[in-house]
Amino acid sequence: MALLEVDGLKAGYGRIEVLHGISLRLEPHALCAIVGANGAGKTTLLMTLSRLVPIRAGHVRFDGRDVTRVRPHQLVRAGLVHVPEGRRMLAQMSVEENLLVAAAAQPSAATAAHIRELYERFPILGTRRSLPAGSLSGGEQQMLAIARALVARPKALLLDEPSMGLAPKLVEQIFEIIAAERARGTSILLVEQNARKALALADYAYVLERGAIALEGKGVDLLGRDEIVAAYLGVTPATS
Amino acid sequence: MIAQQLLNGLFLGAVYALFAVGYTLVFGVLDILNLAHAAIFTAAAFAAFSLASMGVPIPLALLAAAVMAGIMGILLDRVAFAPLRARNAGTLVPLISSIGVAIVIGAVLRGIYGVDERHFAIGGAAAAPVIHLGTVRFTTVELLIFLSAIALMLVLGWILRATALGRSIRAVAEDRVAAALLGVDLERTIGATFFIASSLGGAAGVLTGLEYNSATIDMGGPIELKGLAVIILGGMGSVTGAVAGGFILGAVETLAIAFGLSAWRDAILFGVMFLLLVARPTGLFGKRTLRAA
């Protein structure tokens, strides 16, 4: 059974409907990519999945439970954690406080040890722990954004453009972190501008077009079809 | 003479600051001005008066009135702000609904207490024993008012800096979406913010009532405007700024009187504020830049 099942999801802002009935599955231990042009609704989809944009129609099941009508913090507790576009640092708070805010939202008390563990995994965050998060570099901020999400020990991560605005070397590093997290058994729903990279990594992928799923299939299959790469992903095979 | 006036300014400023920190805390978290803050300030002063007249000791009456004010704050949020928040009503509509709540609170108080001034049995600050310290003099009640205000602000500082609730409040103030995605329960955190802000505002009301030995229906009017000046001066949403602004206001006000300019008091006050804002448009401790419309 899928970890995350979305059926006929509709959502939008005001009078504008952005998502016109999205259905998708995220299997346990899988990495699923969502690609599509700017404005296709990728970020709205993730924001709706984490309930910061209300659901207008459709159903969402997570971990065997209907979570269509829950509040955002309840999803985090259930193990569905969203790393938003633009990283959204609590810039005036320290690196450690960013982690502690996430820890305080957890019911378990073993969080101090867990935060130490995260510092071991991301040593750069350990050395910066008392600095304001806003003073970190872009790559460090993305690392903190992911580490902050891992405090909740998620079963599934929703990652929105984790490589955005990063230098190629840092993009590699972030993708390594994503691959490592997936190897630990976390399911990942990845929204990426860098579609070629995302598809290469993904078990399964959906192409989103104007608020609807236009295509779906195994990542490598989609990647192998030049017309898809050209039409949806904004890069021609020759230039990459 | 100057030392005495500065001391008076300190006493006055502590209460202004206490009122203003609650005001600015709600603004920091929700980006809205809670114009019912002064009404809760007044209600708490009357509640403490009622308790004191039933024989409850003043410190206990202060505490009970502050807790009652905190609960009023939670109700205020549920009635005036939460329904609008759920509909993304922006920041102007809640301003109006908080005025509505302020009017209701005022009417209820008028219904219970009438329009007459009420006095505490202990006779207020002026009647209390006087302490002489070098060239300055003050009363024990003034000292207690000052120490209570400082203690409450220190407790607030500790909560915000060192507790999980305080971190959640600061997280919501900085970025509500980020906080929610980290698992912070927004509604609970906002409710706690209203409790804290309103209990501090209520305590300021009780202390003001003690200072002048009176509670009146319209006692919230002047402090509402001054509180607004204080939080603009300090930087909207900045608790440190509200404390600094409160003391500056207290000092300017008493010094103006000391120099025989009491008729010009408010003109001087707002003149100083004007000059400071020309130099620092976001206020003394304001970090946030003006938002793009």
Image (cartoon, helix red, strand yellow):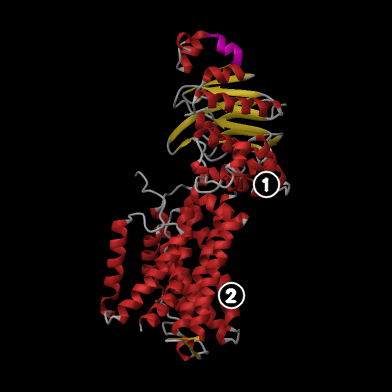
Q: Is residue A60 left or right of residue A135?
A: right
Query: For the residue marked with disc 2, what is the amino acid?
Result: Leu
Q: Tell me if residue B260 can be seen.
A: yes
Give me the chain letter of mark 2: B
Residue type (three-letter) at the residue carrying disc 1 = Gln
Q: Main secondary structure of the magenta part?
A: helix
Corner quadrant of residue B101 = bottom left
Let me know if residue A56 appears in the view: no
Residue situated in front as seen by the camera: B19 or B9: B9
Residue shown at the point (62%, 43%) measured from the top left: A70
The structure residue drawn at horizontal position 52% and vertical position 90%, both measured from the top left corner, is B121
Q: Secondary structure at mark 1?
A: loop
In the rendered structure, the residue with mark 1 lies on which chain?
A: A
Q: Please tell me whether residue B73 is drawn above or below residue A74 in the rendered image.
A: below
Specify whether residue B121 is painted magenta.
no
Up-down relation of residue A33 to residue A75 (above or below): above
Q: Quadrant of residue A21?
A: top right
Magenta-highlighted residues: A217-225
User: Percent x, y for residue B31?
Assistant: 44, 53
Q: Which residue is mark 1?
A: A106
User: Viewed as shown, does residue A25 lie left or right of B144?
Assistant: right
Q: Position of residue A67 (x, y in %)?
A: 64, 38
Vertical side of A231 occupied by B59: above or below: below
Q: Secondary structure at mark 2?
A: helix
Q: Give the residue number, with chain letter if any, for mark 2.
A: B63
Numbered circles on residues, count: 2
- Quadrant that contains the N terminus of chain A: top right
Does residue A218 belong to the magenta stretch?
yes
User: At which x and y percent is residue B12?
Assistant: 42, 76
Q: Residue furthest front?
A: B134
Q: What is the spatial separation of the Cα atoms under label 1 and label 2, in whole angstroms?
A: 32 Å
Badge 1 and badge 2 both on one subunit: no
